[in-house]
Amino acid sequence: MSTETADRLNQISEELKSILETRLQELAGAMRGTEQATRQIVATEMEIARYTQITADSRTELAALKKDAEETKGRADEVGARRGEIIAEREAAREALGRAEREAREAGTQVNDLRARLRALELEGESLRREAEEMSARVKAAEENVARLRRLREELMQQMSALSMSGVKE
């Protein structure tokens, strides 16, 4: 082969080396780009997996919170109903207390009226007792007068009888 051909072969060989080197650099760059893209894809997939897990956890937590909220609402409704019952009971107790206070005032008024009537009856009884004692004393005095008048009459009758007997004897 001739030098020309050898030179030409060297030149082609150099060109092929240069093309191959360029292609290898491009391939290495493409590999680095692919590697970086793969890392980004893996990171993105990991991020997606993390967000998917967070979403699933959030849904589970949301379901639990909804359940807790429903239970709390149920308890709040029960407490509200019980509160209403307690308020109704309190109002009924207030009304009963008001009635009891009115009845107590009325009873107090009746007691005061009855006490006044009792005092009046006691005074009347005392007055009647004194009057009875006075009448008893009068009756006793009248009985004594009647007894004395009877004795006087008997004495007079005896004296009249004695006089009439003495007038007959004479």
Image (tube, rainbow, N blue to C red):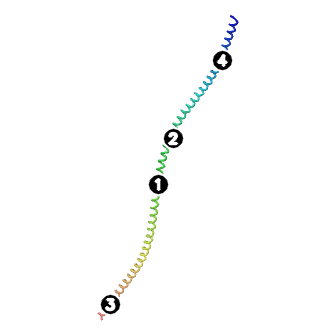
In front: label 1 or label 4: 4
- Say few, some or many: other residues with alpha carbon within 10 Å of mark 1 (under 14 / 14 to 19 / 20 or more): few
Q: Which residue is mark 3?
A: 160
- Say few, some or many: other residues with alpha carbon within 10 Å of mark 3 (under 14 / 14 to 19 / 20 or more): few
* Element type at mark 4: helix
- Say few, some or many: other residues with alpha carbon within 10 Å of mark 2 (under 14 / 14 to 19 / 20 or more): few
* Element type at mark 2: helix
What amino acid type should be assigned to the residue bearing mark 4?
Thr
* N-term mark: 2 or 3: 2
In front: label 3 or label 4: 4
Residue drawn 44% across the image and 72% down it: 120
In the rendered structure, are the residues bearing label 1 and label 3 in contact, judged by CB atoms less than 8 Å apart?
no
Q: Which residue is mark 1?
A: 91
Quarter containing the C terminus? bottom left
Q: Which mark is residue 69?
A: 2
Residue 163 placement, left or right of 47: left
* N-term mark: 1 or 4: 4
Disc 1/disc 4 C-alpha distance (Å): 98 Å
* N-term mark: 4 or 2: 4
In the rendered structure, are the residues bearing label 4 and label 2 in contact, judged by CB atoms less than 8 Å apart?
no
Disc 3/disc 4 C-alpha distance (Å): 195 Å
In front: label 1 or label 2: 2
Q: Residue furthest left?
A: 168
